[in-house]
Image (spheres, helix red, strand yellow):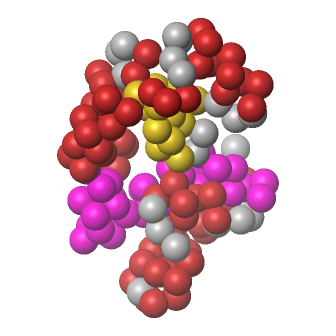
């Protein structure tokens, strides 16, 4: 398993351990779902804080959440000096976001915590991404 996936799994485990008691947070993507989740968990609007992306956490747990978030390993930062690990990470996220269908890097870059400008400004990063795209598509087309 590539280092990127190991780091992602470690980060996920930290989140899973934090979330064992589901009353700490809810996710809702519509007003009706939001109200339903509040009701199901016995929460009021005054007891929660948005964490973005449709997520809300009990305000009393916010400092622990922030502490957890700060403790997470930035997967790309941890592997950025290893070309092969970086390529494997790129290929994983290309597959995960169906690049073979969309040919759009935006979701892949977002998942990696990168922006197009970084590819424009960093020739090495751009070359590795280009190589990953070619290899991923080649592997996909040979299936």
Q: Which sits in the foreground, 39 or 108?
A: 39
Query: What residue sits 42% from the left and 56% below the top?
Result: 88
Residue 97 on image: x %, y %: 64, 50
Task: Tell me if residue 84 can be seen.
Answer: no
Q: Quadrant of the N terminus?
A: top left
Q: How many marks?
A: 0
Within the magenta stretch, is there residue 137? no
Q: Is residue 34 left or right of residue 60?
A: right
Q: Quadrant of residue 136?
A: bottom right
Q: Main secondary structure of the magenta part?
A: helix
Query: What residue sits 28% from the left and 64% below the top?
Result: 77
Query: What residue sits 43% from the left and 55% below the top?
Result: 89
Magenta extent: 73-102
Q: Is residue 26 left or right of residue 7?
A: right
Residue 91 on image: x %, y %: 52, 56
Asked if residue 61 is positioned above or below residue 76 in the image, the reply reads above
């Amino acid at each position: 398993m590539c280092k990127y996936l190991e780091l992602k799994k470690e980060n996920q485990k930290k989140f899973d351990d934090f979330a064992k008691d589901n009353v700490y947070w809810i996710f809702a993507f519509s007003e009706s779902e939001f109200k339903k989740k509040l009701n199901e968990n016995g929460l009021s609007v005054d007891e929660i804080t948005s964490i973005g992306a449709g997520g809300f956490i009990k305000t009393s747990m916010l400092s622990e959440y922030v502490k957890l978030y700060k403790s997470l390993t930035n997967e790309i930062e941890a592997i950025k000096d290893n070309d092969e690990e970086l390529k494997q990470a790129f290929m994983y996220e290309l597959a995960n976001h169906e690049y073979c269908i969309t040919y759009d890097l935006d979701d892949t870059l977002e998942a990696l915590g990168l922006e197009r400008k970084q590819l424009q400004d960093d020739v090495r990063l751009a070359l590795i991404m280009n190589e990953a795209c070619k290899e991923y598509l080649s592997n996909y087309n040979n299936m």
